Amino acid sequence: MILLTFNVLPPSLEWANAVFLVLACLLGGTYFVRNYGSVIGSGISIFIILSTTFVEWLGVTLGLFFGHYYYNPDFGLFIFDLPLTIGFAWLMVIATTHVLAKHITRKLTKYKMIAFSFVGARAAFVMDLLLDPVVYIFKEY
């Protein structure tokens, strides 16, 4: 993590990017399972991975939402021009923003679910907005 943070990861360790994303996915999945039980938490995790992977696939293949883009091979195994680890990364992003939204909206009584959804979605958007330029410019992902 220190090597990634300071952009000094040697080329021989580029495979660690995919491992880091898989571990982040496990952490996000564990959060949902611990908070919602194994069946619902696993279902939420699988839904997040599949739906975000589908949206990313639409972007990569059709240029929808964000214009045409591609991923470099440092993300691990690719299926249909898309690394499997992208859905894993999104699971961690959404788990993180879920925690933030839950905390921010915890005292609300009226419109709590609407506020929770709004805050969570905006937080995920902002996190992606902050992460994308960094990984594109500095890591050329």
Image (tube, rainbow, N blue to C red):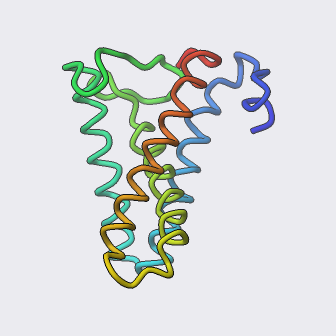
Residue, far left: 62
Which of 79 and 97 lies nearest the eye of the viewer?
A: 97
- The residue at the far bottom in this view is 109
Observer-nearest residue: 131 or 13? 131
Q: Is residue 137 above or below residue 56?
A: above
Q: Hey, which residue is sitting farthest front in the picture?
A: 110
Residue 6 rendering spot, x and y as whole percentages: 79, 27
Q: Position of residue 44 (x, y in %)?
A: 33, 64
Q: Is residue 39 left or right of residue 125?
A: left
Quadrant (top left, top right, bottom left, bottom right) of the N terminus: top right
Q: Indicate the position of residue 113 as horizontal and vertical percent values.
A: 32, 73
State the residue at coordinates (59%, 15%): 137
Please indicate whether residue 32 sits to the left or right of residue 53 in the image.
right
| Residue drawn at the location 42% of the way across and 58% of the way down | 120
Count up the numbered dots: 0
Provide residue 19's location: percent of width, then percent of height: 59, 40
Residue situated in front as seen by the camera: 140 or 126: 126
Classify residue 20 by image quadrant: top right
| Figure check: 12 above or below 110 | above
Residue beneath the point at 34% across and 27% down: 82
Q: Residue at x 49, y 41 (%)?
A: 126
**Left/right of residue 103 with respect to residue 45 in the rendered view:** right
